[in-house]
């Protein structure tokens, strides 16, 4: 970053500080990852300067020959890794990908049905203060009261009563396998469309450690920066029959110029995901999440649903400390360089700014090469800090140990 450091030392210092922060901490936020150096280089390429409104060979600007190549490469690779008929790689984020699908399939005030955010869904699945909740008529399904899992019979009953035009299957805080075939069956029974939002699990789907929704859903959306380990952004997959409507919804319906540098970086990430070692990585993410969840359970912290099938899980803090909130717990952990986030657990009486839960995910630590032994060590540190109410001496000791572990397992794009 020679030019940045010389021209703008203040901005350079921020970029360097983030580098240091990533080096010296452990990223356990379930939706984050460390993209490769190749992905970051593509993301910083000259394509950032180019306007390319439209689609390959149908642009509103001249000079788009390289933009066309980048987008076609990303589209071909996305279709190949997911086995999809059509891909739109332009959405800037997961929420805009979802909204584009709503625009393609629905009219104003049509009914949608998605997972309640408070039970692990996502704000773009119908939260009243999100676009999805403001402009569509929303029914939310929840997890089952006793199992804390999706109960497909309950969801079917609700769908039959609510009669949504579109059902959304997908979550941002749900640790169990999602039965996309069962969702498709329900959608079929009531004549609804099905959107599978696999933002969290896309890398697991490509790595074949989670079933794919592609054969079952009308639309599949995902971000590209979570388990898929690409640049920040998103994509939509659909059948050829929906291609025109989806493309028109993304541009000109919802977005202007695509981020061509991101699209090139998405292409790189898709090539990485096609490699056999990515499947090994995906399997290790799940093995690590299971180990971390098991270790936390052994220490007396209740894991929501009793375990995990994917990359993340929630712990119920009340199981060990009735008064401890997620907000306080996440703050104590971050003082030691263990970065997680407060999260509501199903049927949580506390508000989202407090919460009774913490969410842990293993995509980023797995990208650093950590395995089950390191997960056991991390669980020990988490337990030490929470058991001792964020005690300063214990926190200082663990912060040093976290830094040492970080040196043993460097962030891949910084090696
Ligand atoms: N808010 C993201 C998450 O952390 O799960 C999903 O968009």
Image (cartoon, rainbow, N blue to C red):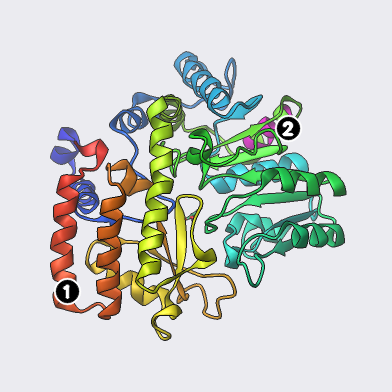
Mark 2 — residue? 245
Q: Quadrant of residue 122?
A: bottom right
State the CA–CA distance, disc 1 to disc 2: 56 Å
Q: Residue at x 66, y 41 (%)?
A: 100
Q: Which is more toward the observer, 189 or 300?
A: 300
In the rendered image, the vertical position of residue 298 relative to residue 109, given as above or below: below
Q: Quadrant of residue 335?
A: bottom left
Q: Which image quadrant: the N terminus?
A: top left
Looking at the image, the residue that sits furthest to the bottom is 323
Q: Residue at x 55, y 38 (%)?
A: 91
Q: Is residue 9 visible?
A: no
Asked whether 248 falls inside the magenta stretch, the response is: yes
| Crowd around label 2: few <14 · some 14–19 · many ≥20 (10 Å) | some
For the residue labelled by badge 2, is the local secondary structure a helix, a strand or a loop? helix
Q: Which image quadrant: the C terminus?
A: top left
Q: Relative to residue 116, is residue 156 drawn left or right?
A: right
Dot placed on the residue nearer the N-terminal end, 1 or 2: 2
Q: Residue at x 15, y 60 (%)?
A: 401
Mark 1 — residue? 394
Residue 168: x and y, percent?
Answer: 69, 50
Q: Quadrant of residue 319?
A: bottom left
Q: Which is more toward the observer, 192 or 285?
A: 285
For the residue labelled by badge 1, is the local secondary structure a helix, a strand or a loop? helix
Q: Which is more toward the observer, 296 or 25?
A: 296
| Crowd around label 1: few <14 · some 14–19 · many ≥20 (10 Å) | some
Q: Relative to residue 114, is residue 37 drawn left or right?
A: left
| Chain part drawn in magenta | 244-250
Residue 395: x and y, percent?
Answer: 19, 71
């Amino acid at each position: 970053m020679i030019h940045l450091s010389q021209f703008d030392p203040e901005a350079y210092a921020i970029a360097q500080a983030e580098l240091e922060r990533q080096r010296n901490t452990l990223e356990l936020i379930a939706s984050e990852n460390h993209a490769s150096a190749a992905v970051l280089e593509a993301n910083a390429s000259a394509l950032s300067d180019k306007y390319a409104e439209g689609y390959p060979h149908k642009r509103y600007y001249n000079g788009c020959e390289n933009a066309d190549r980048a987008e076609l490469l990303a589209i071909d690779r996305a279709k190949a890794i997911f086995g999809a008929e059509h891909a739109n790689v332009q959405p800037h984020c997961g929420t805009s990908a979802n909204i584009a699908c709503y625009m393609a399939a629905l009219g104003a005030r049509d009914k949608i049905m998605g997972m309640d955010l408070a039970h692990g869904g996502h704000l773009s699945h119908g939260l009243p203060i999100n676009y999805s909740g403001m402009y569509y008529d929303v029914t939310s399904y929840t997890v089952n009261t006793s199992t804390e899992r999706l109960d497909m019979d309950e969801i079917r009953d609700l769908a039959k009563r609510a009669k949504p035009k579109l059902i959304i299957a997908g979550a941002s805080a749900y640790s169990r396998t999602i039965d996309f075939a069962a969702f498709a069956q329900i959608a079929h029974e009531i004549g609804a469309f099905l959107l599978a939002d696999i933002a969290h699990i896309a890398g697991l789907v490509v790595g074949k450690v989670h079933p794919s929704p592609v054969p079952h859903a009308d639309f599949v959306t995902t971000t590209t920066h979570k388990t898929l380990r690409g640049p920040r952004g998103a994509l939509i997959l659909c059948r050829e029959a929906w291609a025109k409507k989806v493309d028109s919804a993304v541009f000109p319906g919802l977005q202007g110029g695509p981020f061509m540098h991101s699209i090139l970086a998405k292409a790189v990430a898709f090539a990485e995901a096609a490699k056999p070692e990515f499947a090994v990585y995906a399997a290790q993410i799940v093995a690590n999440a299971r180990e971390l969840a098991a270790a936390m359970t052994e220490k007396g912290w209740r894991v929501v649903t009793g375990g995990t099938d994917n990359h993340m899980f929630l712990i119920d803090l009340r199981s060990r400390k009735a008064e401890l909130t997620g907000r306080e717990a996440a703050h104590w952990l971050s003082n030691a360089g263990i970065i997680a986030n407060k999260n509501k657990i199903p049927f949580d009486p506390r508000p989202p700014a407090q919460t009774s839960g913490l969410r842990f995910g293993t995509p980023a630590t797995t990208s650093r090469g950590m395995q089950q032994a390191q997960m056991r060590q991390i669980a020990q540190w988490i337990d030490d800090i929470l058991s001792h109410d964020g005690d300063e001496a214990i926190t200082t000791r663990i912060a040093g140990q976290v830094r040492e572990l970080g040196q043993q397992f460097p962030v891949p794009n910084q090696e």
